[in-house]
Image (spheres, helix red, strand yellow):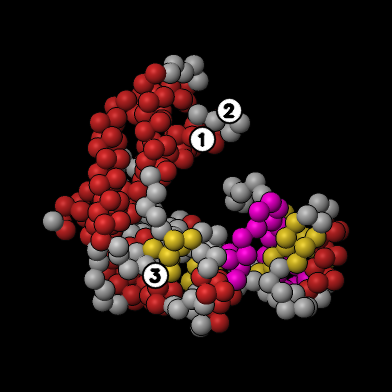
Amino acid sequence: MSDEKIIACLRDDFRLNITRLVFLPIGADVNTAVYRAIADDESAYFAKLRSGIFDETAITLPKFLTELGIQEIIAPLLTKTAQLFTTVDSFKLILYPFVDGRNGYETDLADHHWRELGSALKRIHSAEIPSTVANHIQRETFSPQWRESVKKSLGRIETDTFDDPIATDLADFIKVKRAEISRLVEHTEQLAQALIAHSPHFVLCHSDIHAGNVLIDSNDRLCIIDWDNPIFAPKERDLMYAGGAQFGSKRTPQAEEKLFYEGYGPTEIDPIAMAYYRYERIIDDIAVECEAIFSTTMNDADRAQELIYLKSNFLPNNTLAIAYHAEENQR
């Protein structure tokens, strides 16, 4: 789509006189393109174009939560007719204030940021969501999708031969870790069945509170971004991130958890749910990264990076070791 068409849409539907539009090469979603739009008064905006299936929950939920006073969330700006998005050709266009900030991988969260993150998640988990919004949010089913995907990858590695050096490296690594991965999948399935049996309490969860989705802006404000996959689930779906090696391991797990829960407040942790979500996240990573490495469309540089990500789960003091240690301490 031409820049001129986007600028015209922002003028007609948002009453903005945009003088510069800069494409931002970020994100992996092939159905999304994002831009930095600069108005004639030098105000900056973040414009998102979405094609294909569009779930409005990704914009209606953040808007509702900000109206509850949860200011750590960035809500879309309204059009001149008070809508949360507009349409240009076959695309949906959503407009946000532009946040000039760095994510949790790019900068260390200060002590007060950890407390603010905990406080924000407590308010999110405590929010009563109206049925008009809640009916469009998925509910946790403890699906075996990723566990089954990992099993298929294990089978493929045992039976197939690989000429490609990256896939060969993956196969060699997985063969060494095969027994551990198989035990991990089996144990996580047992945890899932235990959770299904005792029907834990569900709350609204963001579902993906890793360092990349936490921004610190130029005014030192903490912002939680990426509301594409909210879910009603046990609170541990979100709580697993603090102390789970999801923030670049810049602090010890104990230090992260101490600061986080100073903001979140006292709460009873379900050790089964906590262990399940930490293991399931690792299984999800292994499944997605195996699929990417076996891909015939992804470039070699990206495939090599996916292999690094996959292997990193097994490093000392990283995600898997921390999950093992935390579960052992709960027994």
Describe the element under mark 3 as helix, strand or loop: strand
Describe the element under mark 2 as helix, strand or loop: loop
> Residue 47 placed where, x, y %?
70, 63
Amino acid under label 2?
Thr
Membership of 89 in magenta stretch: no
Amino acid under label 1?
Ala
- Front position in the image: 123 or 108: 123
Please name the residue shown 40% across and 31% down the image. Answer: 152
Q: Dot 2 corresponds to which residue? A: 296
Q: Dot 3 corresponds to which residue? A: 203
For residue 285, say whether it is visible.
no
Q: Dot 1 corresponds to which residue? A: 292
> Residue 314 placed where, x, y %?
31, 40
* Vertical side of 318 occupied by 113: above or below: below
Q: From the viewer's perspective, is 108 left or right of 301?
A: left
Numbered label attached to residue 263: none
- Magenta span: 33-60
